[in-house]
Amino acid sequence: MSLEPVLVAGSWTPAVDPAAEFSAHDPKTKAALPARYPVSSGADVERVFAAAGEAVAALRSVSHDARAEFLERYAEKLEGRAKELVEIAARETALPAEPRLGSVELPRTVGQLRQAAAAVRERSWCRATIDSKANLRSLHAPLGGPVLIFGPNNFPFAFNAVSGGDFAAAIAAGNPVIAKGHPAHPGTTKLLAECGAEAARASGMPPGLFQLVYGVPSELGVEMVADRRLGATAFTGSRAAGLRLKEAADRAGKPIYLELSANNPVFFLPGALAERGAALVGELFDSCALGAGQFCTRPGLSVLVDGPAADAFVSELKARFAQASPGTLLAAGLVSALATDVEQLVRGGARLLSGGRAADSERYAFEPTLLEVSARAFVENPSQLGRECFGTLHVVVRARDAAELLDVARALPGNLTGSLYTSGAGDDDALYSELEPLVRDRVGRLLNDKMPTGVAVSSGMNHGGPYPSTGHPGFTAVGIPASFLRFTALHSYDAVRPARLPEELRDRNPTGKMWRLLDGAWSQADVTG
């Protein structure tokens, strides 16, 4: 059987001198699926960079409306092939076709493409700024090079390198994309790319608007993020791989935006446990186990103060973990990684309460696993005991008193989220006021009386956080239009003649609705006087 083609300059073409080949596996049976995909060599990479360079230049003359039209047509194409997309994604990932893929993730993907299109048409996202007295004007503009996207394994649509949030943001900001697919779902990625390529042709986009290789050798990936022709990189995946890419990108002076790891701590304050501890057990377990724990925002750590309510909480939580059936994991590597995680946690001082082993199953699966550790041990070794464990694995940190609970908060590494559960009667207000500033500085999104699993595509969302959850605390991978800014350069114009300025910076507001910072105040008006 021949290898599946790669997408280069708008055409599906055989890979040139592939370095290797691979097949996806069905996580429910561990069997290899029939299609075979190339691991691209330097020859393919050179082809996609050359085509992307031509697209950078061509996109300068593509209107905002045309760029928005592409995103909208792409959304329509995805809806038109929804059944096929859901079927192949379910086969490659074992994620439920319904409701997860068909009724949740695919509509989210379509929705964020349309949100991006609307923002492109409206244009306020570029933050046009005009100082009319000094005749200085600036705006956020394309990078002048393609964006390289490494997609993750756990969201085959919404974070896919050829359809997800990074893709939508990069295209919306006016950059071409080079997509490096994830080996767990190459067939899904190919079908998505087919839809996108059709939309690009129908919208009159440059041939190199986006291109796809399914995989590259690790050393070649390192070279790509440092390529002088690149604008920026977006990576979602393991901390080890991400940091290796970051080192190379930093040496070359190339921006790279990373989503690396998070344990998303949940603090259950004493009043909350006394008031509704049994209900909180259910909330926590459901959030931990959703999608077999394969969410970047699943809670991996909870912190509570010892006492009768805490004892009852842990006892009930242990029972829930012990009674639960293992979920199906996306790949064999996750099973072995969880076994290593348990070993490292126990070595660091945690005590195994339930699970801890690979499931005896034809599926890729690991027993739902619960451990506990003292606050003192956690504070002494937060890097080992606060490690991200990708699956239904949870660590309870038990503090002797409120002071130890605050010490745990101080020892936390950076996280995507942090949740604080408190009494509705106000019994925890004093402790909350001490705890909240400590957690606030260590997370991107702070939640109160709410579990963190799930990320809404909202203008108010921050899917980011301090290192090591991401590589930079000032940016978000989800939330339109804020997510666009990762893939922009700030362009300033000093005494440039009006006819030579970008439309957004001329005296007349090009849309009449676009918000601009005009002499220090946000305005939709034209420049007068």
Image (spheres, helix red, strand yellow):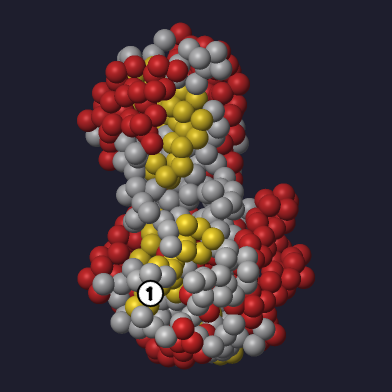
In the image, taking residue 285 as reference, residue 84 lies left or right, namely right
Q: Looking at the picture, how far across and down is residue 112, in whole percent?
A: 62, 61
In the image, taking residue 455 as reference, residue 300 lies left or right, namely left
Callout 1: SS: loop
What's the residue at 52%, 11% (across, down)?
Answer: 274
Badge 1 density bin: few <14, some 14–19, many ≥20, Cα 10 Å: few
Q: Looking at the picture, how far across and down is residue 362, in whole percent?
A: 59, 50
Query: At label 1, which amino acid type do we have?
Result: Asn
Q: Toward which corner of the image does residue 73 lie, by quadrant?
A: bottom right
What's the residue at 47%, 33% (across, down)?
Answer: 419
Q: Up-down: is 464 above or below 314?
A: below
In the image, taking residue 66 as reference, residue 45 lies left or right, namely left
Residue underneath mark 1: 135
Which is nearer the eye, 400 or 90? 400
Which is nearer the eye, 426 or 373? 426
Q: Up-down: is 389 above or below 147?
A: above
Residue 254 shows in this picture: yes
Q: Looking at the picture, how far across and down is residue 192, in whole percent?
A: 63, 72
What's the residue at 62%, 72% (across, down)?
Answer: 511
